[in-house]
Amino acid sequence: MVRSIRAGCCRCLIPRGQGWLELVEAEDVDAVLSIAPVDDVAQAWCSYESRGGSRELSYDDPDWWAIEFFMMRGISTETYRRLLLALCEYGDDSLVGIIGAGPLENFVSDDEEDLAWLESQATRLPRLRAAFANVWAHGEVSEQTMLRLDRIAGIRLPRRKF
């Protein structure tokens, strides 16, 4: 038996019952992506967040799985990049801050290749660039990286007072 993950816009099918939750909870990224491609993950994440998200964990929400997906360890850099691009595509302007304070903030690091990729993508994607205004990375990355993030965001990002 299969059922749609989401009514309406998600076209992927998932196993009914505990099998699906076990894949997500086991952090089997490849198995999840074999059932729910990156675009479907992004659409479900945006659907959940566009409804205001739950104030508490909601395993009953049909799109919660996508929120939990972003908590998985082991998502490759290339897949995470594709996810960020898809979030910017499917998320409307009301989700920009959540994208920045969530998935984008979790991706930001001192990694030179990732920073160069983020800089190049932000120049062509207004939603990605705008999401940087909600990234809180001070204390997690070097000051040099913070200056680069400031340039991407077009503002000085918040700094912790130590």
Image (cartoon, grey):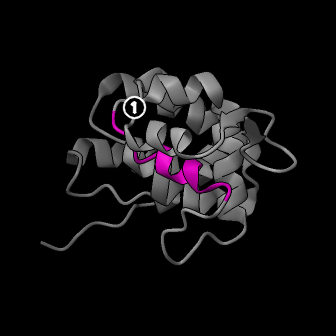
Q: Is residue 61 above or below residue 37?
A: below
Asked where in the image residue 2 lies, by quadrant, the reply is top right
Chain part drawn in magenta: 62-73
The one of 151 and 108 positioned closer to us in this rendering: 108
Residue at left offset 23%, top offset 69%? 160
Residue at left offset 28%, top offset 66%? 159
**Left or right of 78 in this view: 35:** right
Q: Is residue 76 above or below residue 94?
A: above
Residue at left offset 51%, top offset 55%? 100
- Is residue 153 visible to the viewer in this orientation of the structure? yes
Q: Residue furthest bottom?
A: 55
- The residue that mark 1 highlights is 115
Residue at left offset 47%, top offset 36%? 23
Q: Quadrant of the C terminus?
A: bottom left
Q: Amino acid at mark 1?
A: Leu
Q: Quadrant of the N terminus?
A: top right
Q: Residue furthest front?
A: 1
Q: Is residue 71 above or below residue 138?
A: above
**Left or right of 124 in this view: 150:** left
Rendered location of residue 76, percent (x, y): 41, 24
Q: Residue furthest left?
A: 162
Find out whether residue 68 is within the magenta segment.
Answer: yes
**How many marks on residues?**
1
The one of 108 and 50 positioned closer to us in this rendering: 50
Rendered location of residue 59, percent (x, y): 54, 62
Asked where in the image residue 136 lies, by quadrant, the reply is bottom left
Find out whether residue 55 is within the magenta segment.
Answer: no
- Is residue 124 visible to the viewer in this orientation of the structure? no
The one of 139 and 89 positioned closer to us in this rendering: 89
**Crowd class of label 1 (few under 14; some 14 to 19; many from 20; radius 10 Å):** some
